[in-house]
Amino acid sequence: MSEKSRRSIFWSGIIIVAFFTLYTVFRTTNVQSSEKPLTAEEKYPTVFVHGYKGTYNSFKSMLDRFENQHGWGQKTLVISVSDSGSVSYKGTIPKNPTSPPLVQVIFEDNRASMDKQAIWLENAMKLLHHQFNVTNVNIVAHSMGGLASTQYLENSGMNSFVPKTNKFISIATPFQGVTKESYDQINTGAAVIDLKPDSHALKKMYINRHSIPTEVKVLSIAGSGDDVVNVQSAIGSQSIFDKNPFQSKIVYDPSISHSGLHETIKVDRLVGNYLWSK
């Protein structure tokens, strides 16, 4: 091989190495510059509250999708509340999160009355406030969890020993009662009485509605295919939150059932956009 050929190969190698070095530096710099720090609102933990007969699995799939599919947050804490009201937890709330913190609340007695569940949710919120210095939260609740959350806001929304609620999203929540006629025949527990249309618990919630802090922003989601809670009942929250910034959305898909509403990407997008879109 001639001296000229060796020099040509040498300089070609130098150029190739230089190109890939510059590409790597540019790519790394570009990725870092796109990772913007969280806004103050994005740092608020979002608390997920299951419905009647709900368990750890009730919101597990949605939280997995938020974290691993959408990249919208990270589940950092699970709070369990016993039927006596005592609270235990696994995980933490980062002091300076790099992704919106997601919190799951689980009631041991998942058939309890609205009164009890509202108190248990308050206990979970006290833990967030005192143990982790959380000052603001969002709440996302399915079905009866939305009623328990609403009563919690009526009972404790103005108190300084719990975090302020920034946004509240109800999914398929029976604000005017469960509309499936056979529901109370196939289900048991104190909750079933509260879930009946015109129940004492629902009437009391309506009477006490103006104790809810007016700055709480509310989104209620209903499903056209929900055979347990019809659209009118699910967006009946408008009469409860008549002093609050309020929106309602209807998912028009007959294939999505009551339990399926928090298992679909259609609802994921409504929740994610409402919580974190600019």
Image (cartoon, grey):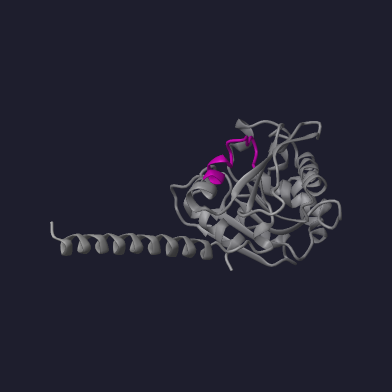
Residue at the extreme right: 160
Q: Quadrant of residue 208?
A: bottom right
Q: Is residue 108 above or below residue 154?
A: above
Q: Which residues are magenta?
A: 50-64
The residue at 75%/41% (across/down) is 117
Whether residue 261 is visible here, answered yes or no, is: no
Number of callouts: 0
On the image, the x and y values in percent for residue 265 come to 48, 51
- Image quarter where the C terminus lies is bottom right
Quadrant of the rendered image containing residue 182: top right
221 relative position to 114: left or right: left
Residue 27 location (% of width, % of height)? 43, 62
Residue 166 shows in the view: yes
Instruction: Please name the residue shown 67% across and 57% down the image.
Output: 43
Report x, y in % for residue 178: 63, 45
Q: Residue drawn 45% across and 53% down?
A: 253
- Percent across and percent down for residue 14 are 30, 62
Q: Main secondary structure of the magenta part?
A: loop
